[in-house]
Amino acid sequence: MPEPPLTLPSEVLSDLEKNIEDTISNGTNIRNVLAKHSTGGPWNTDWEVEAAVEALHVFGSRWTIEILSTLYIAGPRRFNQLKNLLAGISSRTLSDKLRFLVEEGLVIRQVDDGPPVRVQYILSDHGITCGRLLSPLVAHLKICNGSVKSK
């Protein structure tokens, strides 16, 4: 059964929508700057498509957003703590995803030599920034699909 929509006061929803519009405007400005300096004409389509594919490769794969969100909300966690918070993920998948996120610079693998040796995973500044950049997109999608409504 789907969860009931998040109901916000109308002025809060209006503010949220204005911030999303500002993000769209900023995105347009960023895109125009990149286009101005692009090689091969006003738009280098190959570069832009490749950049989008790279982003979707990182953020579009199963468990990535869940791991990043969990680290953002719950803070630094050890492997088993993360596994317990992420219902349904296997140890192998979590291990693979954490390795990938560390390689991408979104997560820091911090080792405390101990004894005993302890490893915890922390969201990097880059990971926090990417999460913040995704927030307007998530909010827009939630508003469009009716998951966020006005009182």
Image (cartoon, rainbow, N blue to C red):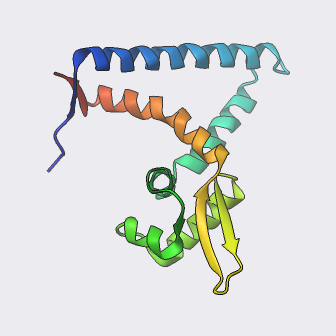
Residue at 38% of width from left, 30% of height from top?
A: 139
Question: In the rendered view, would you say 75 is above or below 129?
Answer: below
Quarter of the image containing the C terminus? top left
Q: Is residue 61 left or right of residue 11?
A: right
Residue 25 coordinates in the image, percent (x, y): 55, 13
Query: Foreground residue, 52 or 87?
Result: 87
Residue 16 coordinates in the image, percent (x, y): 38, 21
Residue at 51% of width from left, 48% of height from top?
A: 60
Task: Answer with the quarter of the image where residue 12 lies.
Answer: top left
Query: Foreground residue, 142 or 120?
Result: 120
Residue 37 coordinates in the image, percent (x, y): 83, 17
Q: Residue furthest right?
A: 39
Residue at 61% of width from left, 47% of height from top?
A: 127
Q: Is residue 129 left or right of residue 141?
A: right
Q: Residue furthest bottom?
A: 115
Task: Answer with the quarter of the image where residue 116 lies.
Answer: bottom right
Q: Is residue 109 left or right of residue 93?
A: right
Q: How many marks?
A: 0
Residue 76 coordinates in the image, percent (x, y): 54, 61
Residue at 44% of width from left, 51% of height from top?
A: 73
Question: In the rendered view, would you say 113 is above or below 133?
Answer: below
Query: Foreground residue, 15 or 133?
Result: 15
Question: In the rendered view, would you say 131 is above or below 37?
Answer: below
